[in-house]
Amino acid sequence: MFLLERAFCAKEKMTSLLCITIISLTLAGSAFSLPTGSASQLKVKVYADLGSNVTLPCRLLSQDAMAFGNIGMRIKWTKVEDDEALNKDVLLSMGFHKKTYGGFENRVFLQELDNEDASIVITDFSRDDVGKYHCEIINGVEDSMQEVSLEVLGGLIDGVVFPYTPLVARYNLNFDDAVQACQKQNASVATFDQLFDAWKGGLDWCNAGWLSDGTVQYPINNPRGPCGGTNNGPGLRSYGRRDKQISRFDVFCFSSALTGRFYWLVQPDRLTFDEAVQACLDDGAEIAKVGHMYSAWKLDSYDRCDAGWLADASVRYPISRPRKNCSPDEAAVRLLGFPDKTQKSYGVYCFKEQ
């Protein structure tokens, strides 16, 4: 086994600073030669700014295979998950034929700097792109599997921004109310930088909310008439600083990574709100808060198509894999509203602190 560690940073055209850390290089067989038909694996970690174009490197590693060029190569890129059933095809290239899939369509391209280059360029890097990728190269001489981990420059994703509207209805929170509302949902009022980061990651919301600096803003990625008009481009729409006592809006909250377990409590029957609270207590947990659900959904890819009670008496469900009858158009936390607490129609999500 041959182990190599090194790190370097490079500037790329039309991208911000891109840092690549090569974690390890493992060669099957002899450290000095690679027998024909053996597999080689390179592990690389790539960091990039949200919204930038980022290159995920992948190359033929065997000198003996280079003479064949990439015309005869089969290149397949896959975004992989711990559960293989959730893997996503990214790109498939066979000679001159190339195809991209799903959310990567028309956004991912082969770099093709030379005949041995199987790297891809992901344009408009978003939080949904964060994760682990496999690059498979098959050319009949040397098969190669290379792994690339893609993360946000400046650190790991440590939280999620979410808009919050209370039971009483839209635009009913002064600033102090907004602070308390977020705290009750295991969150804090989001900063401008956190909202801006979330906007770059794709957050689009047409209701204005408080931020921690006392300003009121909302993020728009798809300009439309009721949300600041179509003449303005994507960005954060700002109402500026507002009177913290008199002005009333919604709020953007920020929830950090979970310090415990968020889960759906299996029950034989549907529950009222009070029964849901007690069921979690009987299981040694508490009824989950909205911040718990958003963190589990965004940071842990939690996915369940069952509507359940949360601590604010709302009913929601988290979908990270859009499908028919389960948020078919986008990954999202779906809100069914604030039903009558005596209604016996839903299950419950619980949270157990570590």
Image (spheres, helix red, strand yellow):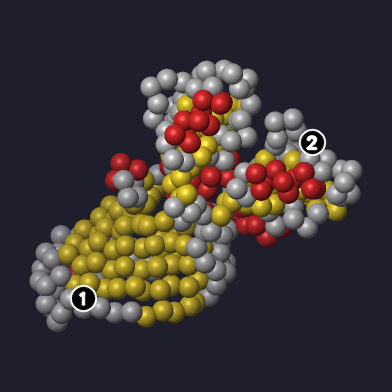
Amino acid type shown at disc 2: Asn
- How many marks the image carries: the answer is 2
Residue 303 location in percent, x, y? 43, 38
Instruction: Report which residue position mark 1 lands on.
Output: 63
Amino acid type shown at disc 1: Gln
Name the residue at 25% across, 61% down. 145
Find numbered disc 1 in the image and state the secondary structure of the residue it sits on: helix
Name the residue at 79% across, 40% down. 173
9 and 123: which is toward the camera: 9
Q: Which quarter of the figure has residue 171? A: top right
Find numbered disc 2 in the image and state the secondary structure of the residue it sits on: loop
Name the residue at 21% across, 58% down. 138
Q: Residues within 10 Å of mark 2 (few under 14, many from 20)?
A: some
Instruction: Report which residue position mark 2 lands on.
Output: 172
Name the residue at 43% across, 61% down. 150
36 and 157: which is toward the camera: 157
Q: Which quarter of the figure has residue 251? A: top right
Residue 94 location in percent, x, y? 28, 52
113 and 263: which is toward the camera: 263
Q: CA distance from mark 2 to mark 1?
A: 66 Å
Residue 213 visible within the image: yes
